[in-house]
Amino acid sequence: MNIPFISIEDVEHKLTWTEVADAIMAGHGQDKARLGDLALERGTQSMLNRAAWIDGLGLALKSVTIYPQNAECQPPLPTIQSVVVLFDDHTGAIKALIDGQLVTKWKTAGDSVLGARLLARPDAKSLLVIGSGTVASSLIDAYREVFPHIESISVWSRNPDNAKALAQVQNCLAVDDLAYAVGNADIVSSATMARSPVIMGDWVQAGTHVDLIGAFRLDMREGDDELLRKGRLFVDSRETTIHDIGELSIPISQGVISERDVLADYYDFARNPALGREYAQDITVFKNGGGAHLDLMVAKLIYDKWAN
């Protein structure tokens, strides 16, 4: 059997952020995904496996290896490498192997702009991106497409030189004063590796949409307790965020918020799109957890674009 490998070069030029967001929303109109994870470790090295199965859509397994010491090789090797295996729902046959970097890139930013499309004010004019890595760059591209009326984009990073470099590439503004920047942004999108909060609720003004992406482990947070108390809370998936990521699990365990304060996830929105923002002055907070079912939804779109 000749199984195709779909690379970034094969299909990325055919994708748009709007189509990715649409595919994620449509996927949540299907039966709820079955999910399963497996993690293996050897010292500092890890292998992570995340699987999803959606009736009528298919199955996907994303396998990721993390080898931090690869950065010290000469020449340096990638520290994170991944592949997504896409299976046919009816026969179980392998349809394709897809570059994991391709799927993760479009899934991550597509997830966030879908959340913003559902929750941010329609008249939002300013975007602040916190972070300066590859995800931050993708977020700028995604928000520019999905929110074409945005007039100003700024970038903040713990490393000011990195913020300036990204701002130069993306033709936007690097900022130094995070508190001021948060307080003057209509949309705040954060993609950091922070272990403790970098966004303080006291900085956030009425009407702001806050998009939290970076935290993916139980010891990671980007927003403080006050932000979660002030905001109307939403997630992409209750199943993969509430108890699995510190952004919510820590304040829930400490009694700052409860599970009931998470008002909706994408499955809820698929049933009732009006669940989000009630008033222009609402602060909305969205946690992007990026579960394996989102990888499946995006991988299926990528396969369809490649095949056609």
Image (cartoon, rainbow, N blue to C red):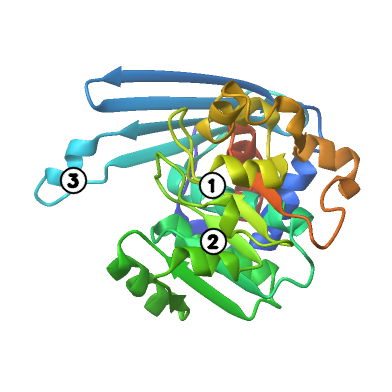
**Alpha-carbon neighbours of circle 1 within 10 Å: few (<14), some, or many (≥20)?**
many
Q: Which residue is mark 1?
A: 213
User: Is residue 15 among what the camera can see?
Assistant: no
- In the depicted structure, whether residue 305 falls above or below residue 225: below
Residue closer to the observer: 186 or 138: 186
The label on residue 71 is 3
Q: Is residue 266 left or right of residue 59?
A: right
Q: Residue at x 75, y 37 (%)?
A: 265
Q: Amino acid at mark 2?
A: Leu
Judge depth for marks 1 and 3 and give the one in front: 1
Q: Quadrant of residue 126 in the image?
A: bottom right
Between discs 3 and 2, the one toward the N terminus: 3
Q: x, y (%) of residue 257? A: 67, 31
Judge depth for marks 3 and 2 and give the one in front: 2
Q: Amino acid at mark 1?
A: Ile
Label 3, label 2: how many angstroms apart (C-alpha)?
A: 25 Å
Label 1, label 3: how many angstroms apart (C-alpha)?
A: 24 Å
Between discs 1 and 3, the one toward the N terminus: 3
